[in-house]
Image (tube, rainbow, N blue to C red):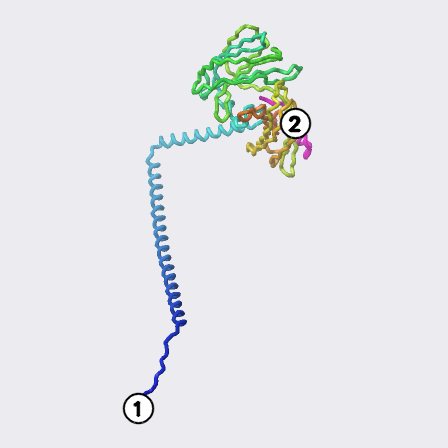
Amino acid sequence: MGLQLPSFEIFLPFSDTSKYCLLALAIALFLIAMIVLAFKIHQYYKYKSSSIVKERKKLMNATSVAKKTEGNILVKSLSPGFLETARKEQDSKIQLMQKEMEKLEGHLTPSPPSTESLDDVCSDSDRPREPRGKLKFSINFNKKTMTLLLSVIEATDLPSYSRDPFVRIRVFSKIDEPQSNVQSVIQECETRVVKNSRNPVFDEDFTLSLQNYQLSNTSLKLEVKDFDKYSRHTLIGETRVALNDLKASETLELCEDLQEKTKDIIGEVLISLKCLPTAQKIEVGILKFKTSSQNVIQERDVYARIDVFSNQHRQKHQKSSLRAKSKVTVFNETFLFSLPDPGKTHCLVLISLYETVANGRKLIGQTSLGNQKTASGHNHWDMMMQTLRQPVADWHPLYI
């Protein structure tokens, strides 16, 4: 009988599915370990950078303290005379700033309005009271052609603040009505600008037509101005010649002292005011504009600009829409401005009329009114305060 050997069964240790599962688990654990390692490295560098920043701040603080100490030592080492001089210079600067503020306060009062533009509020009246210089010119009237030949020769001894002077020429004709000061501008022209000269030589001729105008009601106004590229020309001085005594065919050469600016009334504007105390606002209405000009250019448009100053604070200006220019231009537009306490707040309303020209705009004239006693429109303001919430309209002269 032979020997029988025991039988053994062969078992596979893992199936293919188990192998793949174990492989996936190993990869996942490896990724988790890498993420943990990266996080730890990030924390390490973050801590290191914060430590460096702290050290830099300490170093900067120490440096600033050292500089302050050096500054104090330097101040202490300066002589008392030098310190006194520095204090005097600082005091003089402060006084100069105070004077400028006082001048601005004076300009914001509604005594005769400026006629150049709102940006020219501080133009000529804040200049020092020094001689304004002289203007030399000649005029010749031709009675046959009713033309005036004007030759602007030169200006001499202009003030020190004059840089680039030129001459603006206007011919005015007064309305032939008794007790009327309204005039119209019948001619307007300018000389060239002479750069960097207090004694500019112009030598320019102008032919001014005076047809259909009475010589007795006509006057010539020459303004010497300092040119500004932003059209904020500064008035240096002016001179005026009445043409009523001018003889025909006779050349008259004049050398006149330049005087302070004078105002000319060239029309009227109808303004309405209404006080709204509950809303703490004031309503300004531009109703009509009436001009005496006999040479109205129909192709031009006009618009009004309203600026309000309350307690010397300039509010944002507002503009009317464009209207076709005529003898009587109708606007009928109203504008609201803030006015916290109409009874106590110092208020100035400046109305400017402009006409459109090829190169931009041209000032027609300005008028102002307010609640200060020096204002030309003081009575109008009083009427508004007596009839709250009701519009009150009144005519105001337009100056140029």
Distance from Cα at disc 2 to Cα at disc 1: 137 Å
From where the camera sits, is residue 380 visible? no
Q: Earlier in the sequence, mark 2 or mark 1?
A: 1
Where is residue 294, by image quadrant?
top right
Query: Mark 2 or 1, which is nearer the eye?
Result: 1
Query: On residue 3, which mark appears?
Result: 1
Residue visible at 66% across and 33% down in the picture: 274
Residue 359 appears at what percent x and percent y? 53, 25
Amino acid on which disc 1 is placed: Leu
* x, y percent for residue 381: 64, 29
Taking depth in this image into account, of 50 and 357 the one nearest to the observer is 357
Residue on which disc 2 sits: 330
Q: Which residues lie in the magenta part?
A: 382-400
- Observer-nearest of 170 and 386: 170
Q: Secondary structure at mark 2?
A: strand
Q: Amino acid at mark 2?
A: Val
> Can residue 362 be found in the magenta stretch?
no
Report x, y in % for residue 48: 34, 54
Number of dots carrying numbers? 2
Residue 169 appears left or right of 6: right
**Closest to the observer, 183 or 389:** 183
Is residue 395 visible in the rendered structure shown here? yes
Is-magenta flag for residue 387? yes
